[in-house]
Image (cartoon, rainbow, N blue to C red):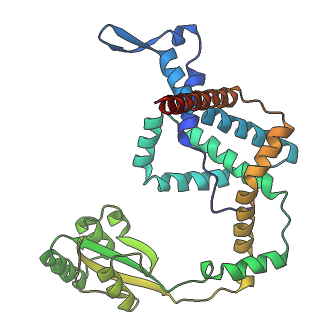
Amino acid sequence: MNFKKVFRYVALPTALAAMLAGCSGEKVENETLATVGDTEIKYTELADQLIGLYGNDTLESMITSEIVKQEAEKADVKVAEEDIDTEFTNYVEYYGGEEQFASMLQMYGMTEDDIRKDIETSLLTEEVIASTIEVTDEELQTYFEENKANYSTEQQVAAKHILVETEDAAKKALERLNAGEEWDALAAELSTDTSNKDKGGDLGFFGAGTMVEAFETVAFAQEVGTISEPVQTDYGFHIINVYDKKEASEATFEDVKDKVKDDYVYAKVSEQFPTWMEDKKEEYKVENSLADKKAEETEGADTEEEAADTADTEEADEK
């Protein structure tokens, strides 16, 4: 089953778990990580602070992963490597590309393998819960009718552009195009849009409300295969090459049934996950001493606060 969305585990708990696992042993625990004047900050102090701040979240994430792993083994559920690859690519794009993704990994002290393991756990979670959900055509039809707008296609335009700083530069670029120079080569040479200049300035398909208004107005008015005059926006001056269009269309249930099923099952998985996980924790008799300790500390703090409030009230009454 192919789900567009994936349960995302928080990166920090994974990084914390990896750090604590990789830095064990008496020698490391006594290691000085920093000095401030004559004061040394030991590994154990950092570990204690991190555990205090993020320890329970990290432990809960590890508990979840282990439960999912065991349930997947029992149900003989596996995740295809290509599905992990697809979601990994989506993950990189979500962070703005490979450079920003690498910076995120470095910031959290993580590796690509850490992310892939999280993705695998997320996909396994969906597959395990999804395997328990029975769906009827009537349910899917109802879901489709309630969310019909999500499956209809609005009018879309596919375009390339060359972006330059001045109108004069745009006119000169247009002259070179009209003289027969190749579009992609000119985009690579002249365009200031570094996100796509090496791909011919290709923006792909986009619908209304995606681009700035001046750009969009011209692009949607153009015929396929035509090149615009220079168009000014806050970004500079664009030459727009419209190479395809898709007209708006209303979806039918039969045409999008598979996608409707994926979306519906994903919605049910998201809805059932919290209850499912709590049931599994009871079934596996999970014990979390960090959570118990945190609850005791919270209860103790509340008791002290109540006692202080009572004392203040009594003191006010005496006055």
Compared with 306, 1 (above or below) is: below
Image location (x, y in percent) of residue 90: 54, 56
Compared with 281, 318 (above or below) is: above
Q: Is residue 9 left or right of residue 218?
A: right
Q: Quadrant of residue 174?
A: bottom left
Q: Is residue 111 left or right of residue 147?
A: left
Compared with 305, 218 (above or below) is: below
Quadrant of the frame with the N terminus: bottom right
Residue at position x 66%, y 26% in the image: 293
Front residue of this view, candidates 98 and 25? 25
Question: Is residue 142 visible to the viewer in this orientation of the structure?
Answer: yes
Residue at position x 60%, y 83% in the image: 152
Residue at position x 61%, y 82% in the image: 149
Front residue of this view, candidates 111 and 283? 283
Q: Quadrant of residue 284?
A: top right
Q: Is residue 317 left or right of residue 213?
A: right
Residue at position x 74%, y 52% in the image: 273
Image location (x, y in percent) of residue 268: 75, 63
Quadrant of the frame with the C terminus: top left
Image location (x, y in percent) of residue 155: 49, 86
Compared with 92, 161 (above or below) is: below
Question: Is residue 79 visible to the viewer in this orientation of the structure?
Answer: no
